[in-house]
């Protein structure tokens, strides 16, 4: 079982910035991929960004050039720097981790609300 603890959500004006953090209960070296997805009210889940164990990073098309994912392996923490926030970024952001052990298991955090206003 992997516990993920998120922090850093909140409110920002359009064009502003927020930073999310996600701490894992195990070493990042034992996690195949870790990142965030989001879900707005009445919308489908959307992939935001993730970083693989080998450092490969992928971003969702809607956040490329605005969001940056990074990690601190020593602190078992992944960060999401969100710049130039737009109204459509408003959503609940969930941290996730994929662990490969026999099969593949995905763990998710409790979610943190990000609200962008004009």
Image (cartoon, grey):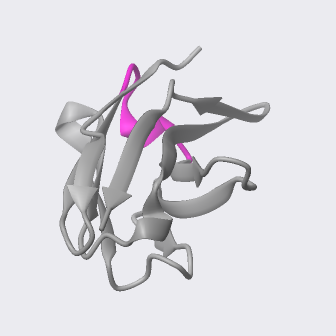
Instruction: Name the image quarter holding residue 74.
Output: top left
- Taking depth in this image into account, of 38 and 109 the one nearest to the observer is 38
Horizontally, is 87 left or right of 100 in the view? left
- Quarter of the figure with residue 7: top left
Above or below 90: residue 23: above
The answer to whether residue 60 is magenta is no
Residues drawn in magenta = 24-32
**Would you say 101 lies left or right of 103 here?**
left
Task: Name the foreground residue: 19 vs 52.
Answer: 19
Residue at 70% from the left image edge and 53% from the top image edge: 45
Viewer can see residue 88: yes
Q: Residue at coordinates 25% horizontally, 43% vertically from top-left? A: 73
Where is 5 relative to 79, above or below?
Answer: above
Q: Give the left or right position of residue 26, taking residue 23 as reference.
A: right
Q: Is residue 45 left or right of residue 76?
A: right
Could you tell me residue 49's position as x and y percent?
48, 63
- For the point 51% across and 42% down, the residue is 92
Q: Who's the residue at 62% across and 29% down the image?
A: 107
Q: Position of residue 1 (x, y in %)?
A: 59, 14
């Amino acid at each position: 079982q992997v516990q993920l603890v998120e922090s850093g959500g909140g409110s920002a004006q359009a064009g502003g910035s927020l930073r999310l953090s996600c701490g894992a209960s195990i070493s990042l070296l034992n996690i195949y991929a870790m990142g965030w997805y989001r879900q707005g009210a009445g919308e489908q889940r959307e992939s935001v960004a993730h970083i693989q164990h080998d450092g490969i990073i992928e971003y969702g098309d809607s956040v490329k050039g605005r969001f940056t994912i990074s990690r601190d392996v020593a602190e078992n923490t992944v960060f999401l720097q969100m710049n130039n926030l737009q109204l459509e970024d408003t959503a609940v952001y969930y941290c996730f981790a994929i662990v490969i052990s026999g099969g593949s298991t995905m763990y998710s955090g409790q979610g943190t609300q990000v609200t962008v206003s004009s």
